[in-house]
Amino acid sequence: MHVVTIDEVPKKPHSSSLFTGEDVSIQPLATEDGDFNMSVVNFGRGVRNKFHMHESDQILIVTSGKGIVATEYEQRTVTAGDVIIFPKGQKHWHGACEDSEFSHIFVTRKGGKNYIQLED
């Protein structure tokens, strides 16, 4: 068994061309030897990631704030307690609304690339 208290996991600043801004941090939750990637991603106000997809399904569990999840065909506002599932290969993005910070837990299967960026 592995028990994690999110508030006790340090936030590590995260910089990547996938994000539209610099105010992003990650809190890793999964163990290195497990079958899944799992972290909390914290977005500053208005920061989102760019269109991307995954080689496995991606699960997002919103933990705080107000955010947007979007595909090529749909855009939804989400808040704490919402669970979003993006099927393997679905082009999507997610991030904070302009007036709110936003945090979610993401879960993907290990193996292959964590994501494939589809826009610059």
Image (cartoon, rainbow, N blue to C red):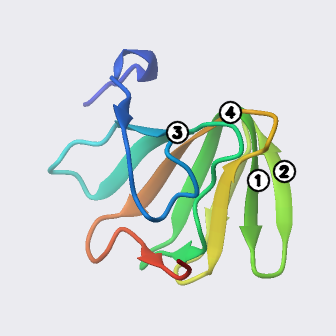
The residue under the point 64% across, 66% down is 93
Q: Quadrant of residue 11?
A: top left
* Measured Cα–Cα span from mark 1 to mark 4: 11 Å
The residue under the point 59% across, 52% down is 60
* Measured Cα–Cα span from mark 4 to mark 2: 13 Å
Disc with the residue nearer the chain's start (1 vs 4): 1
Disc with the residue nearer the chain's start (2 vs 3): 3
Foreground: 87 or 16?
16
* Type of amino acid under label 2: Thr
x, y percent for residue 81: 72, 36
The residue under the point 58% across, 57% down is 20
* Type of amino acid under label 4: Glu
Position of 66 relative to 68 (above/below): above
* Type of amino acid under label 3: Asp
Q: How many marks?
A: 4
Q: In this view, does 85 lie to the left or right of 76?
A: left
Say which residue label 2 marks: 77
**Contact (CB < 8 A) between labels 2 and 1?**
yes
Q: Quadrant of residue 99?
A: top right
Say which residue label 1 marks: 68
Say which residue label 4 marks: 101
Disc with the residue nearer the chain's start (4 vs 2): 2
